[in-house]
Image (cartoon, helix red, strand yellow):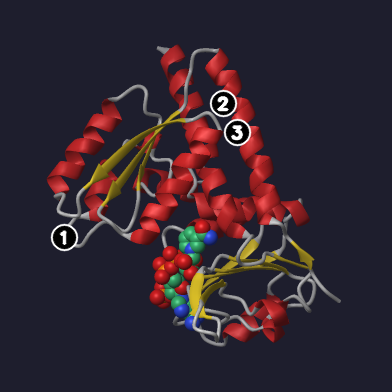
Amino acid sequence: MSATIIDGRAAAERLRHRVAGRTAELRANGLVPGLAVVLVGEDPASKIYVASKTKQAEEAGIRHFDHRLAATATTAELLQLVRELNANPDVHGILVQLPLPNGVDSAAVLAAIDPAKDVDGFHAVNAGKLALGEEATVPCTPLGCLILIREVLPDMRGKRAVVIGRSNIVGKPMAQLLLQNDCTVTIAHSRTRDLPALCAEAEILVAAIGRPKAIQGEWVRPGAVVVDVGINRIDDGSGKSKVVGDVDFASAVTRAGAITPVPGGVGPMTIACLLMNTVNAAIRSRLGASVE
Ligand code: NDP
C-alpha cells in the first residue's frame, strides 16, 4: 500500500487563485488589500521568505509596503514603525519577519501590532480568540495544514489527532484547529513518554518538531493522514544540502493513507494562507467602517 501524496503546491495554487479573484472583486469596489512587510537585518533565509511573500502578494493583486531596516534597528524604532502602520488605513496586514535581531524585544514588537492587522495570527488577542473558539486570525502554517487535511478528510469529527510540537506558531494553534473540527487531540513534545505508542493511535498525525526524519514510518497508524510541517536542511551525502521533513517519508508513505511531502507539502500553503488572511483583514476593515 502506498499513501496518497497530498500536493501542497497544487492546493496553494488553487488558494492563491481564489484569493486573487476575491482581491479583483474588492479592487473593483475601491478596496485594495494592503500588506506591510517589515524585514530587519540581513538574514539570508528571511530575505528569501520576504521576497516570496511580496512576489506572491503582488501576483494576487495585494499592494505591498516594504520596510527594510538595518540590523542595528532598535525596539523603539520598530515600535514607532508598527504604530505608523497600525494608523495607516491602506495597510490591512502587518507582517514582521522573524527572527528579529538579538537585542530587539520581539514580543513587544508583535504585541504592538493591531490585532485586526495581525495577519500572522501571533498576537495574544488572536491566540486567545482561537482558544475561545471565536473568530480569529489563525497562524498561516497550521491553517495551511488544516486545509490540506480537509482535502483528504473532509469530516474530521471524532478522529484521534496527535500534534507533535507545542510552539505558539505551529503546534498549539494546530491543536486548537483540530479541536474546533471535533477531533480528539493530544499534543506531544520533547518530554512526552513513548511517542511511538501515541503515534500509533493517531488517525491524524501532525509533526512540527524541527528534527530531520525523526518520526519513523513504523510508528504511523496504517491509513493515517500524516502532515509533515518540518523544514530541515541536511547534507544529502554528496556535500550538497537538501530539505527534509520531520517524518521519515520513505517509510511513512508505505503505511499512511495520505501524507504531505517535504518539499511541496505544507510549505507552499503558508504564504497562500498569509495572502488569504490579508484579504480577510481588508474585508473586515471595510465591514468595520461601514458599521460606523
Ligand atoms: P519550535 O522549535 O518552536 O518547536 C518545536 C517543538 O517540537 C517544541 O514544542 C519541542 O518540544 C518539540 N520537540 C522537539 N524535539 C522533539 C522530539 N524529539 N520529540 C517530540 N517533540 C519534540 O519549532 P516550530 O514549531 O517553529 O517549527 C517546527 C518545524 O516546522 C521546524 O522544522 C520549522 O522549520 C518548521 N516550520 C515550517 C513552516 C512551514 O511553512 N512549512 C513554518 C513554521 C515552521 P518542547 O516544547 O518540549 O521543547
Q: In which quarter of the view is residue 23 placed?
A: top right
Frontmost residue, 46 versus 255: 46
Q: Residue 148: x and y, percent? A: 67, 54
Instruction: Specify which label sits upstream in the sequence, 2 or 1.
Output: 2
Amino acid at circle 3: Val
Q: Position of 164 compared to 290: left or right?
A: right
Callout 3 secondary element? helix
For label 2, the crowd category at 10 Å Cα-Cα, with few meaning under 14, some 14 to 19 and many 20 or more, is: many
Confirm or reject: label 2 Cβ below 8 Å from ligand 1. Answer: no
Q: Can I make out residue 290 in this image?
A: yes
Q: Is residue 56 above or below residue 256?
A: above
Report the residue marked by disc 1. Answer: 103
Please identify the quadrant where the C terminus is shown.
top left
Q: Position of 225 compared to 74: left or right?
A: right
Q: Could you give the CA–CA distance between mark 3 and mark 1, rounded to whole angstroms?
A: 37 Å
Q: Is residue 103 above or below residue 216?
A: above
Q: Residue furthest right?
A: 1
Report the residue marked by disc 3. Answer: 19
Q: Could you give the CA–CA distance between mark 2 and mark 1, rounded to whole angstroms?
A: 38 Å
Q: Are marks 3 and 1 in contact (CB under 8 Å)?
A: no
Q: Are marks 2 and 1 in contact (CB under 8 Å)?
A: no
Q: Residue 193: x and y, percent? A: 52, 86
